[in-house]
Amino acid sequence: MESFLEAPLKDWRIGSAFDEHHPNAKLRHHAVPGGAFEQWRPIHLLGEGTFGEVYKEKCEHGFFPGKLRAVKRISKEQAGFLKSSQRELQALATFSKKNDPRQYIDDNAPFPETEGSLIAKQVAIGLRYMHQTGFLHRDLKPLNILIDTPGPGWKVKLADFGIARNIAGPTLYTHYIGTYGYIAPELFESSDAYTAAVDIWALGAIVFCMCTGSPPFEQPQYLLQYRAGIRCFPSQVLGLSTGFCIDFIMGTMHANSRQRMDMDEIMDHEWLSMERTVMNMKQPVSYSPPPKDS
């Protein structure tokens, strides 16, 4: 089972348990990466079957108090547990395989810029809200963007806040976190503190990926060479993109975190208004000829 969960499906498992020694044994406790701690309370049973039960749970303590989720509890002592669990997880992967933009990027890159800017704007709105409320995401990537409505009228949501961090806490020195390809260069420097600019970088990497099919620096050594000034940003592969799009990417992925755009500049950027601009261009223009001289 462990080897099976080494695939992307491993992120679907919740490493938690009921603490029998806790004063309230009905609370589910589990730690999340970054040292945070969450508590979830079962509200009621949603359903049950041969190998497990599904409960509706509510977050009592953690990043998002009041959030609801459905959790399936499986007894490992049941005969046939391993085989049944593998079948169920494979079915979930099959029927949910296009629940994040990564699959669409693999199949359809480059994205039409009107659609890419629509996705980027919604992600930016979510990031702005997180930053305004004092949190960094720190693992922004296509896999952590959930699709509510697919294109061309995309509606997406941010997901996976497992290593999100409160900015108001101690200075941020936890490094080497995130996902290669989307991790900002300063996260490789163990002596430097970092800021919300790490999320700005990841947003730019996602846009780059939508334009080309892959992030700009999939190998850490190339990323560090870019930061050191001995490797250029691979902007040549963006040749078919508009100037607005290239400017957005370069502004969010500057090697120096202090010189990246902030959230206000991102929200005001022309590229995020591309869909509205294109729609305005498609509107019929009324024309009234001047009156003839009598």
Image (cartoon, rainbow, N blue to C red):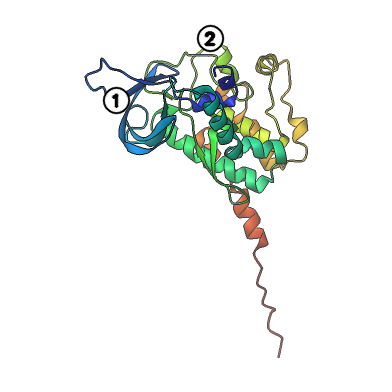
Residue reaching furthest top?
191
* Residue tagged 1: 27
Front one among 119 and 237: 119
Find residue 153 and name its label. none
- Residue 259 pos. (x, y %): 58, 26
- Which residue is at the front of the view, 147 or 9? 9
Q: Are marks 2 and 1 in contact (CB under 8 Å)?
A: no
Residue 1, compared with residue 57, is above or below; it is: above
Q: Evaluate whether residue 32 shows in this view.
A: yes
Q: Secondary structure at mark 1?
A: loop
Q: Amino acid at mark 1?
A: Leu
Q: Quadrant of the N terminus?
A: top right
Q: Position of residue 12 (x, y in %)?
A: 50, 28
- Left/right placement of residue 37 relative to residue 201 reads left
Is 120 left or right of 14, judged from the image as shown?
right
**Which quarter of the rendered picture does the C terminus lie within?**
bottom right
Counting from the top left corner in percent of width and height, residue 266 is at 55, 38
Look at 29% across and 25% down and name the residue there.
27
The quarter holding residue 70 reads: top left
Q: Amino acid at mark 2?
A: Ser
* x and y, in percent, of residue 131 in the image: 44, 31
Tell which residue pokes out farthest to the front in this image: 79
Q: Identify which residue, 218 or 243, lies in the foreground.
A: 218
**Residue at (58, 28) in percent of width and height:** 202
Residue 247 in view in this figure: no
Q: Quadrant of residue 244?
A: top right
**Nearer-the-camera pick, 294 or 91:** 91
Which residue lies under the disc numbered 2? 190
Q: State the separation of the CA atoms marked 2 and 1.
A: 36 Å
Q: Nearer the viewer, mark 2 or mark 1?
A: 1
